[in-house]
Image (cartoon, rainbow, N blue to C red):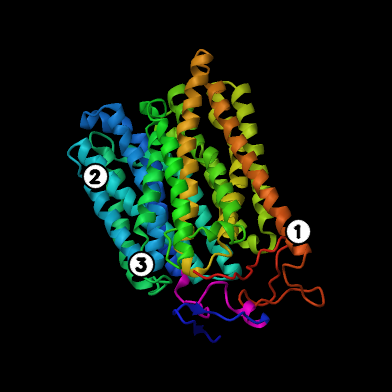
Amino acid sequence: MSVAHDRVGHLVVPPRSAPEALTSPPGDPEEYRPDPKRWSALSVTLVVGFMSLLDVSIVSVALPSLQRDLGATPATVQWVVSGYALTFGLMLVPAGRLGDAFGRRRLFLAGLAAFVASSAAAGAAPSVGWLVAARLVQGLAAGCLAPQNSAFIQQLFRGAERGRAFGLFGATVGISTAVGPVAGGAILGLADGPGGWRWLFYVNVPIGVVAFLLALRLLPRGGSGGRGRIDVVGVLLLGAGALAVLFPLVQAEAGGLSRLWWLFAVGALLLAVFAAWERRVVARDGQPVFDPRLVTETRGYGIGAALGTVYFVGFSGIWLVFALFFQTGLGYTPLQSGLAVTPFALGSAGSAVVAGRLVERHGRRLTVFGLAGVMVGLSAAAVVLLLVPPSAAGWAIAPALLVGGLGGGFVISPNITMTLRDVPVAMAGSAGGGLQTAQRFGAAVGTAALPGLFYLVLSATGEDYPAAAAAGLCVSVLGAAAALVLGVVDLRRNRAEEGDGAAPAADDGGPVRDERHGPGERHGPDGVHSHGHAWHG
């Protein structure tokens, strides 16, 4: 395809002909050539992604021993968990943009090196202040890594392969979130005694070093789609706004919601200014840290990010409710508590991989089906907790959690695929960072609200632990229901667009051939395959 420049040097891309629109991914400036090492590279990024996401929750089971060994107050030691989550969330969008502008491989390697070094520093921490500082740096490093994972999938894969890759990525997200308490309890069980918690951080070091060496060899060079300039004002506005919204949430257990509620208004104002600034940058043909056209002009991105946000409110918060119920209410050990919720993780892992293979054909219908499964499973779990004796709760709840997990696997990975499917590859990092930031916001709300509700019901019912846990599960069901509404809206819109002729159709009613995706593949019933855009990253 020929290109030209206008009088002021802007790139002018002529309209694509029909054959070219089918052979070139939207927004991809170069013809796609499969990288023979793409699956090996994906394996490395998924291991690193699992490790960084696991660290969000794995430390929570060690807080009592941390407090005892370091002589810290409960409010201070809580920062070991909340500080990591805070800096993780703040870094996602800027890191995605940095990867787009300066190279995803470069930023991935830098983030991984910082993650390994800060993990070693956290393990060797002589004081709680040192540990909190190391965790803040570790969160920043993890925030650098996360958006590169989805960006590498956008860069390395197309069509059905991309769906399978996102399926594995979704399984990684689901498993790492659910098995954190199990992994933490197992490590503490093996490293029993004073200082055993240090191995929660030391275990990252050998894994990270091996992953770094493999990443040097396997990750593709290039992938820089930007002009190498960063919107500093946008970064500062976004960071300040996100900090103002997240800070009261991560301090919820220390009374942050009652003391710092006014920060929500400040954060909303700063984020509104950020949105206006980004529109101004785009109007001047600049490079925004987060292009607002991803939401306004990219099919499926805005509604997919909203769906992920409301789903993660319940999905993330429920694990703290289960930990409180099993450990405080029933006297389980951290390992026993983690094993009790393992059926959800197993179901989610298996169905996420399957969903990745089906998303090209069935699209948003998978998300709708999965959300219905989550609602059925968690509702059944709430009923079981209210009806069975507490001594039998751990076993009795397993089938319901398995059903919920099977549904959950059909939510995360298809939603990621559907949300990012039409994003220009040159903007994959910032788009992935934006999506994961939305999920972090939902997770922050859930981890603050659901334990708060648990304690409120516990106090009102005279310490009825099953009732308190069931109340938390009901909120998770409501979050899944809100996500289901968004999924149905998107599904109906996709079908309407297909009915209006938005998706190409074969003359004979057979498979639609799309050279970008491979022979014999069909456009899904709700128009899964990408459509072109008038703008490029």
Residue indicated by mark 2: 123
Q: Which residues are magenta?
A: 19-39
Residue indicated by mark 1: 496
Label 1: how many Cα within 10 Å (few below 14, some 14–19, many 20+): some
Q: Are marks 2 and 1 in contact (CB under 8 Å)?
A: no
Q: Which SS does the magenta portion mostly show? A: loop
Residue indicated by mark 3: 229
Q: Earlier in the sequence, mark 1 or mark 3?
A: 3
Q: Amino acid at mark 3?
A: Arg
Q: Are marks 1 and 3 in contact (CB under 8 Å)?
A: no
Q: Secondary structure at mark 3?
A: loop
Q: Is residue 85 left or right of residue 393?
A: left
Separation of residues labelled 2 and 1 (CA atoms): 55 Å
In the image, residue 5 above or below residue 212 = below
Quadrant where the N terminus is found in the figure: bottom right
Q: Are marks 3 and 2 in contact (CB under 8 Å)?
A: no
